[in-house]
């Protein structure tokens, strides 16, 4: 009889199969990863994730590809200019790993949009739970470009009792942290987090690549141990000018 | 302050003089700036003379006196690698980090 994780018994996963416990493999395959943003962070994070396992993905991004995106958004090419990034991402990721289940939503992720796409709203009455179709767990991958947008996804995570794997980048700098259920952005970034100004435009391509890698490391840590990860309650801050990583406790 | 101090006690929060009053004292404290704050202050690290005890809000005020451009910035303050709320009173600080949140994706 086949086990649920037999999908990972494939030669393409040979290099890392033994590095993941059976529990971690099972959670990877039984989680619906809701990805908010298919830009700089999203491209790197998604490519790594689909190379690790045939994951279930929802990819949300309202934007079309602009020329300045090409310095860091690794899934796209100049021929894609003007096309929706969510759709392009699903196409490219499926080419990388045909085993994934991926759906594109060409719109911003927020409660209203989520409710329109799912029969069971995330704002379910207290005591009931929002459904995760074909998945036992949900996780939100925060690859957004503003804290206002982040405030919009937090209620979805709360209703689904899902963790948020956060990444943020700007100039030469970046940060990552994990918000396990019960924690919110205000715990990590203060009560006025949504008032934080949108990012300055300049960004170097290796910064989102590095921060996305930290997010993936956290996702794998959560698959191993859902109640505690190295960055739950801890902000990992990268200073790309000085090659320095700091760990700052926020809880 | 003022007068001779025969002994100092520490109650876990403030240092106290012989009368039990909070003792004010200063330390050269390492201050680190992250992200755009390094551009505004012109440095990523400096040592400032900080008088303790003081609240995190008062510490921020002291930093803004040193670098007025910080007043318009949104950032949190971590003391010895732990983020502290504005009203937290600090008796000492080995290292202060000024952390803006990076918003981009």
Image (tube, rainbow, N blue to C red):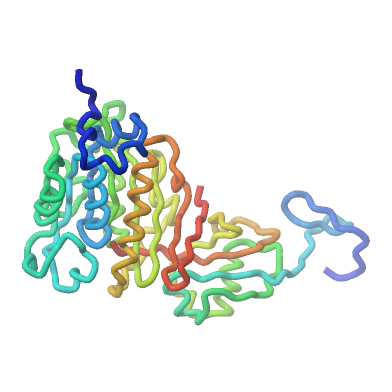
Left or right position of B3 against A122: right
A167 or A70: nearer the viewer: A70
B22 or A54: nearer the viewer: A54
Residue drawn where x is 54% and y is 65% of the image: B97
Q: Is residue A131 visible?
A: no
Residue drawn where x is 66% and y is 59% of the image: B90
Left or right position of B53 against A243: right
| Residue A137 pos. (x, y %) | 27, 33
| Residue B35 pos. (x, y %) | 43, 71
Left or right position of A213 against A113: right
Residue drawn where x is 29% and y is 31% of the image: A26
| Residue A217 pos. (x, y %) | 37, 48
Above or below, B41 relative to A62: below
Q: Is residue B7 visible?
A: yes
Left or right position of B96 against A220: right
Q: Quadrant of residue A41?
A: bottom left
Q: Residue at the top extreme?
A: A1
Above or below, A225 relative to A93: above
| Residue A124 pos. (x, y %) | 24, 33
Q: Quadrant of residue A6?
A: top left
Above or below, A55 relative to B13: above
Residue drawn where x is 31% and y is 61% of the image: A209
Above or below, A137 relative to A175: above
Q: Quadrant of residue A180?
A: top left
């Amino acid at each position: 009889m086949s086990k649920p994780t037999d999908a990972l018994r494939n030669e393409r996963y040979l290099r890392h199969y033994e590095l993941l416990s059976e529990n971690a493999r099972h959670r990877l395959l039984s989680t619906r990863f809701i990805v908010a943003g298919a830009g700089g962070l999203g491209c790197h994070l998604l490519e790594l994730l689909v190379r690790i396992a045939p994951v279930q993905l929802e990819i949300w991004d309202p934007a079309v590809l602009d020329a300045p995106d090409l310095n860091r958004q690794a899934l796209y090419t100049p021929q894609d200019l003007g096309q929706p990034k969510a759709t392009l991402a699903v196409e490219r990721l499926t080419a990388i790993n045909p085993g994934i289940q991926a759906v594109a939503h060409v719109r911003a992720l927020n409660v209203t949009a989520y409710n329109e796409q799912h029969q069971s709203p995330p704002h379910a009455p207290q005591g009931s739970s929002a459904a995760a179709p074909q998945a036992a767990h949900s996780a939100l991958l925060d690859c957004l470009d503003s804290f206002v947008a982040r405030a919009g996804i937090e209620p979805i995570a709360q209703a689904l009792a899902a963790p948020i794997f956060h990444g943020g980048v700007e100039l030469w700098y970046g940060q990552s942290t994990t918000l396990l259920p019960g924690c919110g952005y205000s715990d990590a970034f203060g009560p006025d987090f949504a008032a934080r100004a949108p990012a300055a435009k300049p960004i170097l391509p290796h910064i989102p690549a590095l921060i996305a890698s930290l997010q993936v490391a956290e996702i794998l840590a959560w698959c191993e141990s859902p109640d505690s990860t190295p960055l739950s309650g801890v902000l990992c801050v990268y200073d790309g000018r000085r090659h320095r990583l700091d760990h700052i406790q926020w809880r | 302050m003022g007068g001779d101090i025969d002994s100092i006690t520490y109650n876990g929060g403030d240092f106290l003089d012989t009368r039990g009053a909070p003792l004010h004292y200063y330390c050269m404290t390492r201050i680190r700036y992250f992200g755009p704050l390094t551009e505004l202050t012109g440095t990523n690290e400096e040592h400032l003379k900080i008088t303790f005890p003081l609240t995190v809000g008062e510490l921020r005020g002291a930093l803004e006196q040193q670098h007025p451009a910080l007043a318009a910035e949104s950032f949190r303050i971590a003391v010895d690698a732990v983020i502290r709320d504005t009203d937290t009173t600090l008796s000492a600080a080995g290292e202060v980090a000024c952390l803006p949140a990076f918003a981009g994706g």
